[in-house]
Structure formats: C-alpha cells, structure tokens
Amino acid sequence: MATKYNYSVSADFPNQKVDINKLTNEIRDSNITLSLGYINQDSNDCDIWFKADLSGGEETILNGIVAAHDGVVDPEEETPKTGPDNKMMVYESSRPLGTKIYFTCVGDNNANNWEVGGGQSTYFEHQIDDTTNHIYYIDFNTVENESYIHEGYIMWYGCKGDDLTLDFVPSVTPVTPSGGDSNYNLVNVSGVPDLVYGFMIVPAAPGTGNINVDSTAMVLVKIVPSFDYGTILDPGYWDADFNTTTKEFENITPNYTGTGGYNMFAAEVALTRFVNKMTLLDKGFLQLQTAESEQLPHNIRCRVAMNTLLPDHEWSCSCILVIHRSKTV
C-alpha cells in the first residue's frame, strides 16, 4: 500500500523551493531501500510517495534529505535539450530513473548484501559423463541496489538439440514440522495450510502453527511494485527493518493482513520464467531482446537449468545479462 510523506515547502525546505527531478535523484541515491513512487508539489505542499511505509531509520534519512535540499535546478535540466532544428529532443528508455546500464557475465556475491559482482559466472559447460541435467544459481544483491533485468544475450557451441531454461526462484528458509504449537504455517498456493505440498511461510495464530522456523535462519524475499501499475499487488506476510550498517534484517514481525514488505518460502518454486527450454543447435548467438524491464527483488535467484540431449556430447554456452542498477560498482 502506497504511503505519502507530506512536507511544507515554506517550512521544511531551506530555500522554500523544490526541484522534483533533483529531489528524486537525492532520494534514490540515499540509503533508503524502499522504492520511491513519485513526488508531487501543489502550492506549499510537497508530497513524497513511497510504495509502502518507511522504517523509522529511513524516515529520518528522508527528513534529512528534505532539510538539505536546496531546490536549485541543475544547469543541464534548466531548459529542454533541442536538436539543430530547435525541436525538443525526446529520449525513450526502459531504464528507470536513477539507474545505470550494467552488462554482466557474473552474479553478485550473496555473502555480502552490498557487493556488486564476484558471484556465479554465466558461462556453463557440459562434459561427457556429467549428469545430463545441470542447475546453476545466479544471485543479485538488490536490498541496497535497486535493479531491473532488461534483456540478455546467449552464445553456444557444440549443441545437438540441448536446451536451456531460466527461472526466477526464491531463496529458501529451512523449516521443520511442529506439533501444531508454533507461530508459523506452511501454505500452498491457495493459502490452505499444507505441510507436505506447501511452499510459503505465513504467520499462524500464536501456538497453532504446523512448522518450526529458526529465527536466525530466516530468508526474506522483498515484495516489489508492479512495473505496469507502480503499486504492490502481491501479498506480503512479514515486515522487517534493514540495518544499513550491519547489512542485516532486524525486527522481523508477522503481518497478518498480507500488507507486509516481505515473504518467506520453504521450497524452491518457479515464480516467473524468463526462458523456457530454448533449443540450441550447433553454434550460434542470439539476443533476447525486449523493450521491458522487470525489477529483481532481493533474495530472488536466477536458476539456470541445462539439459543435455543423448547421446552424450560436450557443449557449452555463455550468457550476458543486461541490467539497470542503482549502483554498478
């Protein structure tokens, strides 16, 4: 649910004026991890909308940004850019405001919530006598680095009808069965408690849950706004604060109304599929081109599945991912 933070232009901004583009960039470059919706100024009111409630620490950061905002228009934004014919130049891009283009052949190091790069390579190969099915995971740290996957490129060699699938799956929180006396339930897609087939961890009425969860091993998957509508459409059953100093989640609490900022999963399920059994022959190169971008939630993993067609043979492939990111180093 979107949340508005209202400020007085005359009382809260030092120069009694606001430059919305500049203020937007200042917020996106800050340590506020929640996605900014938009900023609206009407006379003396400046409304800053976020996708959900800010934590107490993030609201303090926002107040500091407002108190330091000078409202001076950056020189390059004072007048629209024009071409030789003096007509306004319009730039169209799927890149969200405040992000940069990022080409990569590696994921991030998931041992460090801040690090860019240093993770799993996107070069994969199959050798004779290997298992015919390989699974690789590519992680991106996005809790402090808003990121959107845009498109990709794939190169392959030695293929004989082998195929490749790319899914987005949640990182998993380990669970154990309980005697019906915990604070957690495992539910299936319809929301019905199901210890065997369920995959989502939701709060149970105290002392009635069907699973146990180690509070030190919880893995939170962030809920992100719909790119089409700019609002959060999916339910979230957990709230938490992210400590920008320790790089850890704190104050993890249940949200019984489903309006929280995070979910937890006990099983690895495909939430979306980007590439489905792409058949590869001989050698080649292909651009997976699109005009769209999709936000990568924190603790969502790219799962690459390689399937080798018999008779056994050697083959390899390499992927380049195109991502829009707030921080690229």
Image: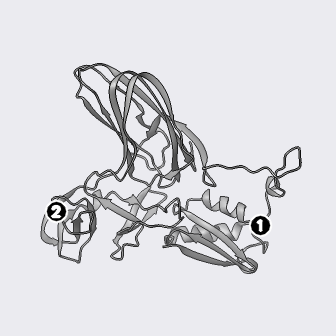
State the SS at label 2.
Answer: loop
Q: Position of residue 161 (x, y in %)?
A: 33, 26
* Circle nearer the N terminus (2, 1): 1
Res. 321 in view: no
Res. 268 in view: yes
State the SS at label 1.
Answer: loop
In the rendered structure, find residue 31 and report the number of the disc placed on it. none
- Indicate left or right for 294 with 44 as reference: left
In the rendered structure, find residue 195 and report the number of the disc placed on it. 2
Question: What residue is rendered at 58% in x and 64% in y?
Answer: 36
Q: Position of residue 84 (x, y in %)?
A: 88, 43
Label 1, on which residue?
A: 71
Q: Amino acid at mark 1?
A: Gly
Q: Quick one: quadrant of the C terminus?
A: top right
Question: What residue is rendered at 34% in x and 71% in y?
Answer: 253
Colour basis: one colour
* Badge 2 density bin: few <14, some 14–19, many ≥20, Cα 10 Å: some
Of residue 28 and residue 304, the one placed in the foreground of this image is 304
237 shown above or below 267 = below
Q: Amino acid at mark 2?
A: Leu
Q: Position of residue 168 (x, y in %)?
A: 38, 48
- Rounded to the nearest whole Å, what is the CA distance between mark 2 and mark 1? 55 Å
181 shown above or below 140 = below
Asked if marks 2 and 1 touch (Cβ < 8 Å), the reply is no
* Badge 1 density bin: few <14, some 14–19, many ≥20, Cα 10 Å: some
Of residue 119 and residue 250, the one placed in the foreground of this image is 119
6 shown above or below 36 = below
Q: Position of residue 154 (x, y in %)?
A: 46, 31
